[in-house]
Image: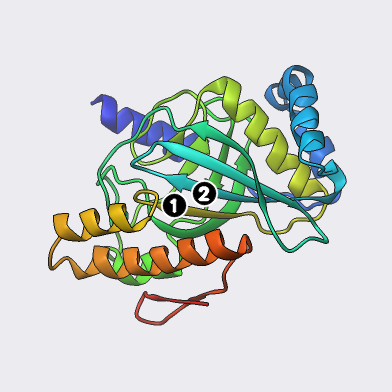
């Protein structure tokens, strides 16, 4: 019953339309929780950006989540730079499901793959939330047709049935960062979700734990390629979604 109610709450409260960039910060600050977040956390966020030599008006973000390590890495750069630097890391305070992609509603899985932020919710039942574009083009091919689910978000309150939860204190800072990036021109904020940090040791273990599971193995191979390219170059690889649900990474 609790699981059903949590799912229902997620459905009715975690989706909001993406506002235009013009006046985005101002429109967000009309909501009390966002306004309070700026009042409480803006100075910390500003100092973090200053230490990284990034001006808020030139901020671009990239978010990486590792399910096994329960870690969310926030990468940032100036608009005119090619390479990202690690700005900060936050702990994912709770997880659900197991290693592997989300393929249907109710499987409790946190998705894995290549996403971006497509909705913001300043009145979320989970304090503040930013939703990713699950199901993406790959999920719609490989998931259970007609029962894919949705409304997967990064949010506060430290509860989950498939989302990425943080504490309220952390989501305030992350929400501010994302509002600043969008306000200042970043039209798409990418989010990549991994089963684990895909070094060779973790990758080998995952493959050995799931022999013959082509869905998982194909996705993990693609994610590993993207992981290695990003670590090597500190720039986003080019991701192409293929008609069979797989990805071309270069």
User: Which dot marks residue 93?
Assistant: none
**Residue 242 x %, y %:** 43, 80
Q: CB of mark 2 within 8 Å of CB of mark 1?
A: yes
According to the image, label 2 marks what residue?
Answer: 64
In the rendered view, would you say 95 is above or below 195?
above
| Label 2 element class | strand
Q: How much space separates mark 2 and mark 1, taking CA atoms?
A: 6 Å
Q: Is residue 183 left or right of residue 218?
A: right
Q: Compare residues 133 and 1 and report the one nearer the observer.
A: 133
Classed neighbour count for the residue bearing mark 2: other residues with Cα under 10 Å, few (<14), some (14–19), many (≥20): some
Question: Position of 235 compared to 216: left or right?
Answer: right
Residue 218, percent from left and from top:
29, 70
Extreme residue in the bottom direction: 243
The residue sitting at 39% across, 27% down in the picture is 159
Q: Secondary structure at mark 1?
A: strand
To which residue does mark 1 refer?
Answer: 193
User: Looking at the image, which is closer to me, 2 or 38?
Assistant: 38
């Amino acid at each position: 019953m609790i699981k059903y109610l949590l799912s229902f709450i997620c459905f009715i409260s975690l989706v909001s339309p993406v506002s235009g960039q013009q006046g985005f910060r101002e429109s967000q600050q009309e909501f009390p929780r966002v306004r309070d977040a700026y009042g409480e956390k803006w100075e910390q966020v500003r100092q973090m950006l200053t230490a990284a030599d990034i001006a808020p008006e030139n901020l671009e973000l990239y978010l990486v989540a590792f399910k096994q390590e329960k870690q969310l890495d926030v990468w940032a750069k100036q608009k005119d730079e090619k390479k990202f630097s690690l700005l900060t890391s936050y702990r994912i305070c709770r997880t659900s499901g197991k290693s592997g992609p989300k393929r249907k509603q109710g499987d409790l899985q946190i998705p894995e793959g290549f996403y971006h932020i497509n909705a913001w919710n300043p009145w979320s039942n989970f304090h503040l939330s930013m939703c990713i574009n699950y199901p993406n083009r790959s999920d719609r091919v490989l998931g259970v047709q007609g029962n894919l689910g949705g409304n997967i978000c990064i949010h506060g309150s430290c509860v989950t049935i498939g989302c990425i939860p943080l504490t309220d204190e952390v989501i305030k800072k992350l929400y501010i960062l994302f509002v600043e990036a969008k306000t200042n021109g970043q039209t798409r904020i990418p989010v990549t979700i991994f089963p684990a940090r895909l070094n060779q040791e973790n990758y080998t273990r995952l493959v050995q734990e799931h022999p013959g599971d082509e869905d998982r193995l194909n996705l993990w191979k693609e994610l590993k390629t993207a992981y290695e390219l990003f670590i090597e170059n500190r720039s986003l690889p080019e991701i192409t979604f293929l008609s069979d649900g797989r990805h071309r990474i270069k």
